[in-house]
Amino acid sequence: MSSESYAIDQLAEWVHTTGSAGAPAEVMHQAKRCVLDAVACATAGYGHPSVAKVSAACRANFSGGSSEVWFSRDTLSPVGASMINANASSILDLDDGNRQAMGHPGGAVVPAVLAVGQQIEASPSAMLRAIIVGYEVAVRVGAAEQRSSYHSGNFASFGVAAAIGVLKGLDPQKIAHALGVVAYYGPRVSDLTLSNEMSSNVKESMPWSVVAGAMAADLAAAGFTGIRDALDNPERIDKRRLLNGLGDSYAIDRTYFKKYSCCRWIHSAVEALVYILEEKKIQLSDVEQVNVETFSQARQLNNATDPDTLEGAQYSVPFCLGVAAVHGEEKLMPLTRDILGDPAVVEQARKVSVVSTDRMDAMFPDTTPAEVVIVAGGERFHRSIEHPWGDACTPPADDELVAKFHAIAKGLMPETRVSAIANCILDDAGSIRSLPNLLREPLVS
């Protein structure tokens, strides 16, 4: 196989060209929306115990830099700061995602670009272009990967390597080597639905993807070589899908956003349940059963009725439906530790059954469908949802994303500060460069 036909070379050429020439204004604005959402998610996630643990490890191993650790007066190397910020952004499962890649690029790409961009004093437009190419590469690798679901960590590292490579001005050859390095140095996450430990802090390994991607870019910049045919192995990658239509559109435009801090595969069921309860004014004491028909991947989540960690709760259809039934959907915006073990929630969760059908499987991953049937007072009430809030086909307006930020930041920072951060990010003048100053102050404890 000649080097000219390597998939990595073709990706690298596109990354270099787009990173230098830019993208249409509406795509650049979408990148700002993704920055806004990542920061909002980190605001909610920063109080999770895992963030303090990651912070301690990063301070011990990645000190000596000028990149901001969000909501802290600490600065670390870009790798350390972005690993902490990525952990905060992704730990509550509020972060954005892509339907075809079946995972989350933003929780890794955005923190990495902002940390490196601060260190090298990159322009706002350069950072936005880097985010765009990072999403593109991450999503394409994720969608082309010949694996089952839950591999955000597998593809996010490619996006980070591409984004940092272009942000640091690497030429196409070195960007190609960065991708070739991360293909072997990056995490290779197995399907979490096959594990009994979905309740752990590891999740899809996105924070470590930041480390692997950033190191791959720096290694390539120093002349370290990667394996450039790594994405030509048909056992790992569908090369046609990886490269098809490259340059015709932008993957970042197909980003979905989330309002519930649980797996995206649960959102349709939650929305359907809330609709039925509100529309039919059903009393919880009358609910006998809640039957959920969905696709296989959602059924294969751990689905514990009484999870003992927030991560376990995020991967449970019954528990999330129990939370929404007892406390309303607002309690999922975000889930907090105080809800664990709630007797009323657990009681409702135990009424929920989850099955998958061929009909629903055929609709996934283009949609994440669910049909909910509530049996109450001897009657059956049903509702189907295919596209929950935030899907790319019906994207939320800027105001809705800002409202999400306000909702999940309530009690953590003043509304005036939330508005200032949102305005800084979405401002057409590109004032994103001053964002670190607004993120420096600690949150309300």
Image (spheres, grey):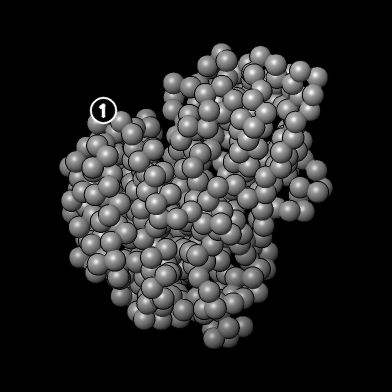
> Please, is residue 36 above or below residue 31 in the view?
above
Q: Amino acid at mark 1?
A: Ser
The image quarter in which residue 3 lies: bottom right
Query: Left of 158 or right of it: where is 354?
Result: right
Q: Residue at x 36, y 60 (%)?
A: 32
The image quarter in which residue 133 lies: bottom left
Q: Residue at x 26, y 50 (%)?
A: 421
* Residue 358 visible in this rendered orientation of the protein: yes
Residue 285, given in percent of the width and then of the height, sits at: 66, 14
Give the quarter of the figure containing the N terminus. Answer: bottom right
Q: Nearer the viewer, residue 409 or 136?
A: 409
Q: Nearer the viewer, residue 415 or 292?
A: 415
Residue 281, given in percent of the width and then of the height, sits at: 64, 25
Disc 1 packing (10 Å; few <14; some 14–19; many ≥20)? few
Residue 382, given in percent of the width and then of the height, sits at: 74, 35
Residue 277, given in percent of the width and then of the height, sits at: 64, 28
Q: Residue at x 66, y 23 (%)?
A: 282
Q: Which residue is mark 1?
A: 445
Q: Residue at x 50, y 21 (%)?
A: 340
Query: Left of 84 or right of it: where is 416?
Result: left
